[in-house]
């Protein structure tokens, strides 16, 4: 009966051994990519380590074999069980030591697992089992256990539990084998209480890991942004995350990149200056969206501008960009400038009640990815905008990418035309976004591209401006319908266009 | 239950003037309009537009009638009908009205007028919950078998053809208003059959199609399709042939408070004055007619103003050179003296009327949608007991969802006879009514009640006339359409079913006779 217990533990132990190997391989290819390389190198490292473990097992004295087997089980349980959690956390922390820790862990687990089978065989052999019979049975169960896990892991465990929890469950199995063996062979062991104590401690740690694993995963997955998170906040409207990597600060709203300090000057100069340089007499400007204050920073370069009104939905956003030291350094305290008035309201609703007239209206809203946002890119919305625009003034609309989402981009152009505007579409290369599009629009038919700029700029000049207004043959306008509220063609175009790009 | 107390007083014999205080005043006018629903308001609008000023509208128990609306926590919502299809070519009166209030921006009488997009229902117009999944179409292709799909296509192709089909008199077979439809016996023979039998006769067996046809009848007529004339069933699909320059066919017009939005616009066009005794502007008074008689070729009516606030119940005498009786016919039967004299015998000619329940759910935030589906304006549940629910905030141009919204759930109580349903409505406990009202939304949302702050239920015992087989040849209705003299009749009941275009048509006809 006791021998059967040992054989059964071989089955469990073998499953656990393969499980850790699979988890490490899957995790590495998931986080680092290049599946073939990751799996090959991890299996190689693991098998080699098992060889080292088998070699080391010879230094265990015969009379200690059972006790060491139990120790090894407890160690594998805690190290293997926590392996995925540790790796996730390390990856979230920094990517450089990740490989080192990965291979160190794989090697350690491999060594321990490599000791298991030789020790079990020796215990059984010491109990006068027949060699032929014993080797056959142990190895049969060893390979059966491997088969069981190799099927369970991809079909059930990985999709249902995820990596961290799967590893924790197998860790518990190892600890269970240790405790069960200690129980059954109690009489042959010294220090049974110590074993039980250690076993319980390992189990408690693993169970706690299971209980908190969802928080751990959440934390680790957030870190998939890769960079250090310097601010994260969930507001009633969106999830805002600001990350930093070296001198690059990035803002993500609901996981979508809004700007990177490496190249946001390109985006914002292109958004603001072609219109503003053409409006030397401009006194008041309205900005819809743009709660990061970066468009306003560009506007403040015009000393004659007296009033800038910024309407952004989310008070948390404008507050963050008015108060955070790091972020106000980027927007140069634009939102707290006395010439700037910040209003937190829904753009459409606010326009319905506002009575002001503006020389320029800069519309820097999130992309039209759903029907609610699509309404802000509709014919009635642009008619409403038109009512607030001075006769000589210009509207500029950020209009997603004319390269990746041509139907969506030209739909914005068609919508503005339908609302009675003359339009001058253009585009700029913003490396972190790719080729990005804008539409300049006015109530009159005259606009001349600026051939110089009166304010200090880093990106725009006469020649880059010429290129912006030129659409080469790989960016020609497709036939599109304007975005009407009753069909929201823009939302459909946007979805279809980006669906083709992002697989 | 708007109008129920007043209606039952009339039914139980309030005309016995002894029970009422004697008239405390007298009002004279050129035209009195009894009822302020769509028919009455259209008549008032037409008369005012033609320069008539001395008009007196007696509002009736519920201003706006079936086009009534309400407000919950500052959010306007419907408590009656909620939309208007794009007007057909024949509905010139509706097109003129829409152009007058600015809903049609250009080319009002052309094939494809331009409409104010804020009033056209925004995307997504409707969706259907079937087997736990939302579909964008009421007859979703992806949820049908090949056999069903081919039947659906055949049916839709057929009703598409009917949109342009004409009779031997050159008129459209299914025109709206119905009075302008062809008299060709070939088409009108459909009225002898009920809609379910017609579908079966034509070889339609698809369960989703039968559900859809039945849904359409319940939605527009308040009766199930086996109690609806096949002519009326097809009329629903074939008559709405209106198009728009800036919307797809099949688009509809709506306001947050349903058709009350249209009524509001109409009232401001009519330009009601503030004082009842000043006859230089159209006037509107509260109250309802207890009796309408013809005396010396003029109309003499007794109007009851119920007690309100500090004012106690009083009656007024209204004398008018002309009057338009714009109230439901089952009420007119008790109010107008000698209805039989007009060729209308209430005992045989009154169309059956269907009861309705309209429940407004004030929502605090929005309930969680399955699989992140997007809420549509009209949300329908396949094989649901109700007719689905519409969202009052759908037309707002907002990015953020408002803190409060109103979901309006409609129920045609067509699962039993109208009489039994009315009895049930009268005796049901609030909990029973609520259970029925929330039925559809319970199927749509796992968690409903945490989001519901308040529910207001409007019960309409006699909400609308139902077009049962044979309704086209109701002699009483045909007679009332022709009545001319001091008293005219105007109500959608005269078309045999309750639709804005029909009510407006009879209001228009009555007003035209007076001009």
Image (spheres, coloured by chain):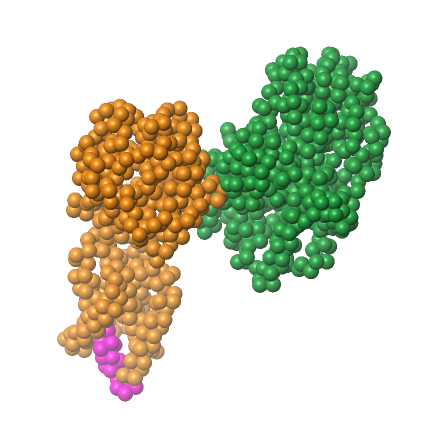
Q: Is residue B268 above or below residue A18?
A: above
Q: In this view, does B444 lie to the left or right of B277?
A: left
State whether the magenta stretch is mostly helix, strand or loop: helix
Quadrant where the C terminus of chain B is found in the figure? top right
Q: Any idea which chain is the orange one in this picture?
A: A
Q: In this view, does A391 lie above or below A492?
A: above
Nearer to the camera, A249 or B138: B138
Q: In this view, does A498 lie above or below A350?
A: below
Q: Residue B352 in magenta?
A: no
Q: In this view, does B55 lie above or below B512?
A: above
* Residue plotted at (36% across, 48% down): A477
Q: Any idea which chain is the green one in this picture?
A: B
Residue A232: where, in percent of width, then height?
Answer: 28, 42
Residue A122: where, in percent of width, then height?
Answer: 22, 79
Q: In which quarter of the image is residue B57?
A: top right
Residue A44: where, in percent of width, then height?
Answer: 21, 72
* Residue plotted at (31% across, 53% down): A474
Instruction: Give, as a single range, the part of the protein colored magenta.
Output: A108-133
């Amino acid at each position: 009966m006791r021998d059967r217990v040992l054989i059964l533990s071989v089955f469990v132990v073998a499953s656990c051994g393969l499980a850790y190997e699979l988890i490490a391989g899957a995790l590495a290819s998931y986080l680092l990519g290049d599946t073939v390389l990751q799996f090959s190198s991890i299996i190689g490292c693991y098998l080699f380590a098992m060889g080292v473990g088998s070699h080391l097992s010879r230094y265990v004295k015969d009379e200690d074999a059972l006790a060491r087997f139990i120790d090894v089980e407890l160690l594998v349980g805690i190290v293997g069980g926590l392996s995925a959690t540790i790796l996730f956390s390390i990856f979230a922390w920094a990517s450089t030591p990740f490989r080192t820790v990965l291979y160190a862990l794989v090697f350690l687990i491999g060594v321990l697992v490599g000791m298991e089978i030789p020790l079990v065989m020796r215990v059984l052999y010491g109990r006068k089992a027949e060699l032929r019979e014993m080797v056959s049975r142990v190895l049969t169960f060893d390979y059966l256990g491997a088969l069981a896990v190799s099927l369970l892991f991809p079909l059930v465990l990985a999709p249902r539990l995820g990596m961290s929890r799967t590893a924790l469950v197998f860790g518990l199995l190892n600890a269970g084998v240790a405790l069960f063996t200690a129980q059954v062979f109690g009489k042959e062991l010294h220090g049974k209480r110590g074993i039980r104590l250690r076993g319980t401690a390992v189990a408690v740690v693993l169970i706690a890991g299971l209980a908190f694993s969802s928080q751990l995963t959440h934390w680790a997955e957030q870190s998939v942004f890769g960079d250090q998170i310097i601010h994260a906040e969930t507001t009633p409207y969106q999830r805002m995350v600001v990350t930093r990597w070296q001198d690059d600060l990035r803002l993500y709203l609901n996981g979508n990149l809004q700007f990177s300090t490496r190249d946001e000057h390109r985006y914002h100069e292109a958004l603001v200056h072609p219109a503003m340089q053409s409006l030397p007499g401009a006194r008041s400007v309205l900005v819809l969206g743009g709660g990061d204050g970066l468009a306003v920073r560009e506007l403040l370069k015009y000393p004659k501008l007296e009033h800038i009104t910024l309407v952004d939905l989310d008070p948390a956003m404008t507050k963050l960009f008015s108060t955070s030291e790091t972020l106000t350094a980027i927007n140069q305290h634009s939102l707290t400038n006395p010439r700037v008035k910040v209003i937190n309201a829904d753009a459409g609703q606010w326009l319905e009640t506002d009575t002001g007239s503006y020389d320029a209206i800069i519309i820097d809203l999130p992309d039209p990815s759903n029907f609610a946002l699509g309404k802000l890119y509709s014919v009635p919305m642009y008619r409403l905008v038109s009512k607030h625009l001075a006769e000589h003034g210009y509207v500029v609309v950020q209009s997603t990418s004319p390269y990746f989402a041509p139907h969506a981009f030209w739909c914005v152009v068609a919508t503005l035309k339908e609302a009675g505007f003359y339009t001058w579409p253009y585009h700029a290369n913003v490396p972190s976004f790719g080729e990005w599009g804008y539409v300049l629009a006015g109530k009159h038919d005259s606009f001349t591209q600026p051939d110089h700029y009166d304010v200090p700029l880093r990106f725009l000049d006469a020649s880059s401006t010429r290129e912006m207004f030129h659409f080469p043959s790989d960016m020609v306008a497709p036939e599109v319908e304007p975005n009407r509220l009753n069909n929201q063609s823009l939302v459909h175009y946007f979805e279809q266009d980006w669906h083709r790009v992002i697989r | 239950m708007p109008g129920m107390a007043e209606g039952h007083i009339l039914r139980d014999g309030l005309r016995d003037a002894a029970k009422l205080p004697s008239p405390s005043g007298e009002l004279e006018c050129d035209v009195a309009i009894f009822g302020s629903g769509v028919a009455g308001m259209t008549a008032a609008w037409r008369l005012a537009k033609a320069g008539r000023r001395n008009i007196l509208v007696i509002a009736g128990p519920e201003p706006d009638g079936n086009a009534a609306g309400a407000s919950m926590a500052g959010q306007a919502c419907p408590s009656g009908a909620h939309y208007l299809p794009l007007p057909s070519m024949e509905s010139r009166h509706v097109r003129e009205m829409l152009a007058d209030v600015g809903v049609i921006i250009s080319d009002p009488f052309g094939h494809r007028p331009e409409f104010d997009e804020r009033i056209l229902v925004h995307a997504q117009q409707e969706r259907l919950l079937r087997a736990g999944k939302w579909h964008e179409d009421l007859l979703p292709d992806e949820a049908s078998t090949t056999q069903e799909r081919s039947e659906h296509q055949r049916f839709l192709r057929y009703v598409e053809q009917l949109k342009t089909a004409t009779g031997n008199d050159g008129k459209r077979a299914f025109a709206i208003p119905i009075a302008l439809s062809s008299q060709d016996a070939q088409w009108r023979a459909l009225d002898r059959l009920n809609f379910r039998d017609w579908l079966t006769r034509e070889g339609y067996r698809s369960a989703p199609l039968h559900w859809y046809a039945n849904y359409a009848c319940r939605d527009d007529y308040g009766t199930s399709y086996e109690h609806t004339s096949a002519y009326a069933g097809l009329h629903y699909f074939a008559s709405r042939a209106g198009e728009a320059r800036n919307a797809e066919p099949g688009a509809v017009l709506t306001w947050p408070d349903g058709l009350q939005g249209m009524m509001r616009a109409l009232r401001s066009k009519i330009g009601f004055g503030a004082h009842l005794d000043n006859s230089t502007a159209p006037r509107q008074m509260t109250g309802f007619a207890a009796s309408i008689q013809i005396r010396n070729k003029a109309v003499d009516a007794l109007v009851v103003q119920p007690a309100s606030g500090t004012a106690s119940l009083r009656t007024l005498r209204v004398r008018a050179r002309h009057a338009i009786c714009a109230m439901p016919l089952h009420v007119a039967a008790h109010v107008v003296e000698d209805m039989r004299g007009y060729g209308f015998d209430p005992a045989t000619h009154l169309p059956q009327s269907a009861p309705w329940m309209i429940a407004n759910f004030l929502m605090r935030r929005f309930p969680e949608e399955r699989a992140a589906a997007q809420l549509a304006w009209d949300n329908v549940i396949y094989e649901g007991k109700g007719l689905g629910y519409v969202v009052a905030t759908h037309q707002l141009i907002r990015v953020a969802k408002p803190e409060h919204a109103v979901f309006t759930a409609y129920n045609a109580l067509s699962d039993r006879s109208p009489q039994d349903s009315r009895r049930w409505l009268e005796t049901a406990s609030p909990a029973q009514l609520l259970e029925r009202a929330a039925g559809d939304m319970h199927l749509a949302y796992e968690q409903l009640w945490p989001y519901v702050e308040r529910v207001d239920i409007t019960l309409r015992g006699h909400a609308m006339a139902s077009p049962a087989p044979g309704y086209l040849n109701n002699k009483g209705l045909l007679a009332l359409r022709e009545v001319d003299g001091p008293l005219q009749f105007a109500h959608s009941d005269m078309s045999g079913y309750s639709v804005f275009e029909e009510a407006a048509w009879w209001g228009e006809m009555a007003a035209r006779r007076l001009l």
